[in-house]
Image (cartoon, rainbow, N blue to C red):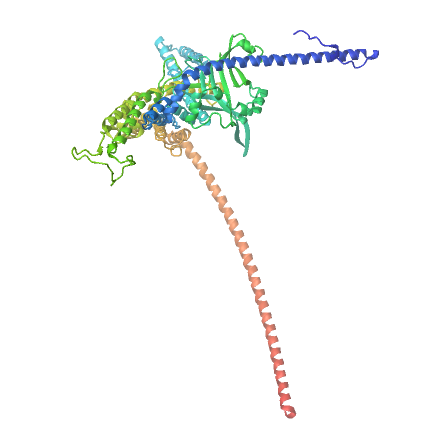
Amino acid sequence: MPIPEIAVTDVKVISTDSDSTPNVKAQILSQYQEKVREIEEEEAEAEAKAQVSEIVQYLHSVWQTNSSHFNTFIQPILDECTRRLHGKYDSKTKKLIADSGGTDIYLPIAAQIANIAESWLIDILSTSTTTNRPWRLDPTPIPDLPKGLEERINEKWLQEIEEAKSQGAEPTEDEKQMRLNELYEGAFQEVNSIARQAVEAQQALIDDVFEEANFIGELKKFISLLTKYPTAFLWGPFYKKVVKSQWVNGKLNQYEGLQEFYKAVSPYDCFPSPNATGVNDGDFIHRIRLTRRELVNLKGLDGSDDYAIDEVLNNFNGLARWVSWQLNQQEKEDLELRNSHEPKYSGTVEVLCFYCEVPAKTLVNNPIAQECLEDEIIEIEAMLVDNYLIRCNIVDTKKPYFRRPFYFTSYRKKPDSIWGESPILIAGEVEDICNSSVRALVNNLSIASGPQVAVDPAAIPQGQDIESLHPWQIWQVSAINTTSGKLPIQFFQPNSNSNELVAVFNVFLQRASEITGIPWFVGGSNPTAGAAATAKGLSQLLEASAKGIKLCLSNITEDVIKPAVYQQFISNMVKGKGALIYGDVRVIPSGFNALVLGGAQEERVREFIQLVAKAPLLLDIIGIEGFTQLLRKYGEVANLDINGVIPSEEELRVKLEKQAQAEQKPSPEEIQAQLEQAKIELDKYKADQRQKLAEARLQLDQAKMQLQMEIEKLRAETELRKQNMKDQADIQEAIAQGLAKERQIAREGEIKREMGSGI
């Protein structure tokens, strides 16, 4: 960068003293360098703004292309699905019905079919039990041997051959090959056992991650969208800041961290490129709605622009629906009883998330993109709000298993297209025919519900009300033609065509079930009739008739569940999650068998347990461990909690070892050693008992002595108490005698006073 020219007035001279000339030069040079840095920073900031502006312009061009295609070709189809889902006629049909004056009754047959398909698919796929999950992990048929194990097998094989030679028994070539095969077979069995343990651990880990990420809940929403719209999308895993809780040393510790989530996305919020065949094909745009708190949580994350986020927060209300205002979604929001312009304030702001490839020149000054500049096209993930680029990340597409975090499928797919067909669309034309029949039926029954009246206006007096009919009505007429017998008022009954119209309705209603592949009896229509009256018959009916559902299940498992599970497995492997790590696996979708064959599997396991219990030879073959595994398997398929009933593998191993030791016959030497040990233990026991007896006697003597002392003490206290009582009685007797003597003397004195001196 060339050094900019600086005006003399930009530099302040501090002093002109000759002695301070070096200091003045240094100050001038320092100010000059500071001014250069300021100019460089301004130019860099201007260049960065221009760079961001260039990226924003490119993203807006992508948005214009995708949204224009969406408005023209996709949104009308989505609006039709929404209209049929809410049971509304389109504007053209509504006008024709209003002009003809007929009823506007609407039977949402397609929506009912979609609801039946939704409930059935949810029953099959959204179960959270470990036995009926719609997927499982299996090791590959021939697992890879760990690195170095093959060399160790060969070393052991050569060592055994050398030992045999040293003993003079050199094996033949066939024996050598047989022994090598045995070593490899044992290694494969051991590796396969370890692989299955690792796979089971990974299954439990994926279940735990899916539980925290609400995968099952969002899968239900995904199925609901799938049965109603041409295509459904599942977004994930994506990360959000959450407050996590953890107990440490008895105290609750809360901290902020990133957590994986999944989310079902409305097709109204997905904008793939025109003619795209998948989410990784072309540019994919996803509309999300973020609250103020969620915008604030974006700060500090990789690729986030805190300044742009603050600008969006400052203009939050004005940017709340900036995307919706560019799209023609008035009909959809009217059907949902919402107004796209009221209220003006919204609690969320619309954000466009771009997953697209951009020219490398638009990111030439981005430090993150320096490693990717050799590529002409760079994959980015960007978040745009109007003209504010609030986040932009470079994605390394060279990493294995790269894919954008979206999964999609349709009830019925179209070749080389993201958009397919839903049951509502498939049954749309049949629904129109059924509703035409119903409208005609209602109109015909209304006309045929009572007699029609023919009135001769010339024979009716002026002012007579001819539009009102009621029983015992009296008609005033001017004259009656007695010659012809013709009355001025006549009644006639229109014909009813209800039987023909009902027959047409039933035929096309059955046709709707056939073309969608969704049998009516699944929705509860006459469930006890025919083969559906029994569980086995119902299973056969489901197997024979639900071809459409089975095809949809195949689409869901192959396009969504299987890649999502495998991607989560790869993510766990990369992060090193789990105690056991094993990468040579495959994802097996269960699909239709998860529900239909669930009861059959339980029955088969029960029958096999009964067979083993009745055949001692089979029990000897599989052993107690195998029989325990069968019981655990039955508990899983029957959804029984048997953890406290059946001992764990470690407890069972210890118990079997004790039994084996008890059943093993000891040798004479072991018997003699056991007798000597028993004698030693007996002598020790006798000595311990003698010592305990002596201690008991000593304690008894001490107790007797203590008791004797207490008796003597009690005796002395009793004698003292008696003596005290005796002394007290003598004192009381003396006092009583003195009192009696005093009373006698007093009495004698009173007598003398009464008798006088004559006594």
Task: Name the spot of residue 362 as percent of width and height, x first.
Answer: 55, 10
Q: Is residue 359 visible?
A: yes
Q: With 350 as the anchor, is 165 left or right in this view? A: left
Res. 627 image quadrant: top left
Q: Is residue 331 left or right of residue 503?
A: right
Q: Does any portion of residue 223 appear in the rendered image?
A: no
Q: Residue 278: which quarter of the image?
A: top left
Name the quarter where the C terminus is drawn.
bottom right
Residue 124 lies, in percent from the top left, at 35, 26
Indicate left or right for 424 with 274 as reference: left
Front in this rendered view, residue 191 or 332: 332
Q: Residue 342: where, in percent of width, then height?
A: 49, 27
- Residue at x 59% of width, y 20% of height: 307
Q: Quadrant of the N terminus?
A: top right
Count the marks.
Answer: 0
Seen as rendered, the residue at the extreme bottom is 758
Horizontal side of residue 342 vs 443, given as left or right: right
Nearest the camera: 562 or 357? 357
Residue that sits furthest to the left in the current view = 483
